[in-house]
Amino acid sequence: MSTFQGEVSTLPPDKSISHRAALIGALAEGSTEISNFSGGFDNQSTLSVLRDAGISVRQEELAAGDGRVVRRVVIESSGLWSFREPSAPLMCNNSGSTMRMMAGILAAQPFLSELVGDASLMKRPMKRVADPLRQMGAEISLSDAGTAPVVITGTKELKTIEYHLPVPSAQVKSLVAFAALHADGQSKIVEPIRSRDHTELMLGLETIDRPDGVREIIIDGRKPIAAKPFSVPADPSAACFMIALGLLGERSEIVLRNVCLNPTRVAYIEVLQEAGAGLGIENVRSEGGEPVGDIVVRSCSGLKPLRISDHGVVAGVIDEVPMLAVLSAFASGEFELHNAAELRTKESDRIDALVVNLERLGFECEQYADGFVVKGRPTVNREEAVIECFDDHRIAMSFAIAAEAAGASLRLSDRDVAGVSFPNFFAIIESLRQ
Ligand SMILES: O=C(O)C1=C[C@@H](OP(=O)(O)O)[C@@H](O)[C@H](O)C1
Ligand SMILES: C=C(OP(=O)(O)O)C(=O)O
């Protein structure tokens, strides 16, 4: 067991907010300044796609007073229809958010465009993108398997929509909202299960919480969006890895500064606290419409096994499941997940990726369509196991944390994939090691 102690002010800027700040900047009239933009590969893909679609994007690295390097991005646009027909397919690399949210914008542009990605992204479902955009009047073609390339014949005459989200997905919600901003009239999105709400907050959209728990989001189309500055807080999904490091480590105490504490992003903190984790939240304040604060984590010896099945909780912890599963397995020998078939549609089939790798480490698992269970660890694998990362940053980082903290001996098939959302992941671990 290793010990990890110290303060972290260099967690990556939030991936979801960075994507949206850039996309909203491209839709706004004027100059949008984004401070603390993420250097993660996924967010850089959004910038390069915007550039390739005719938007002016400048990015510079500035030295912050405390030794950090902060990215400042400036986007210039003349509003909703500032995009230009790209001369080649737009490469979204590993980023599902980039592909899906850009599709919503491109559906409203009067030209032909094509979105492509790396091997992992080309396997992910895009019918959920095509369905609402076809209803709005755009022509969308996909592969026979319902995957990218997403070929879009956009139209300036998109129709308004009332769209009931068939899956709890903030990407689908956002792409419909971005398209609806261009339609002539009012659109409505109906969201039975809550997903992250950064798009609504950043665009200042009207939301109605019905007594039955369903949320409606109202979008008035063809209203000019005024450019405004954005400042991006640290990514709570990245913080989750360092929290697991602190919980699993011996005599560890880590303070994570300026983390986004939006309630739609930090359900995992509640899940961990209910299981007995020593986690504190301090200095909570509001920055740019998002709650932000510091998280204090201390080693925890008696963490109870995590069992996650409620649909709302699953949606709230969707990106943290890999870390929660590995943490629970290492801390208690057990874990259980249901109602989480969505996890099979991420950068990898995360249910399979977790089970394959946990089994390599000697855990006994059983997977089913919408989840899996870890039943114990009858044979602790003391040989050097190789973790297969499946092109998936969260799989790589989850197992890297468990190995560091629990002293397990394992190698990752691909360390660099962490850079998709967390380029300084290994550097932060080193800075905390005692
Ligand atoms: O909107 C977003 O920024 C995201 C939404 C989630 O995807 P889904 O919308 O597919 O659930 C999440 O998994 C992804 O990491 C980021
Ligand atoms: C699912 C994720 O991202 P995306 O869908 O943007 O590739 C993720 O970061 O876990």
Image: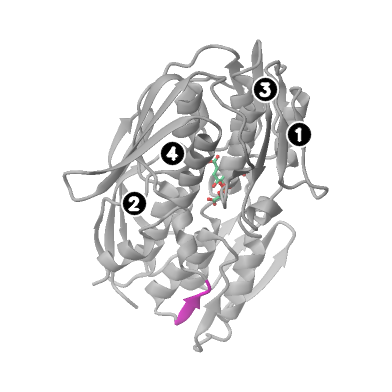
Q: Height in image: 79 above or below 250?
A: above
Q: Earlier in the sequence, mark 1 or mark 4?
A: 4
Badge 4 amino acid: Ser
* 95 or 338: nearer the viewer: 95
Q: Is the magenta stretch mostly helix, strand or loop?
A: strand
Q: Name the residue under label 1.
A: 140
Q: Mark 4 points at which residue?
A: 18
Residue located farthest toward the right when viewing the structure as drawn: 144
Give how far across and how far down residue 234 sits, in percent.
Answer: 36, 45
Q: Mark 2 points at which residue?
A: 11
* 196 or 268: nearer the viewer: 196
Q: Name the residue under label 3.
A: 110
State the mark number for residue 77: none
Query: Which of the two discs, 2 and 4, sits closer to the camera?
Result: 4
Badge 1 amino acid: Ile
Query: Which of the two discs, 1 and 4, sits closer to the camera?
Result: 1
Calculate the distance from the C-alpha at mark 4 to the C-alpha at mark 3.
26 Å
Calculate the distance from the C-alpha at mark 1 to the C-alpha at mark 4.
26 Å
Q: Give the range drawn in magenta.
A: 409-413
Calculate the distance from the C-alpha at mark 3 to the C-alpha at mark 2.
39 Å
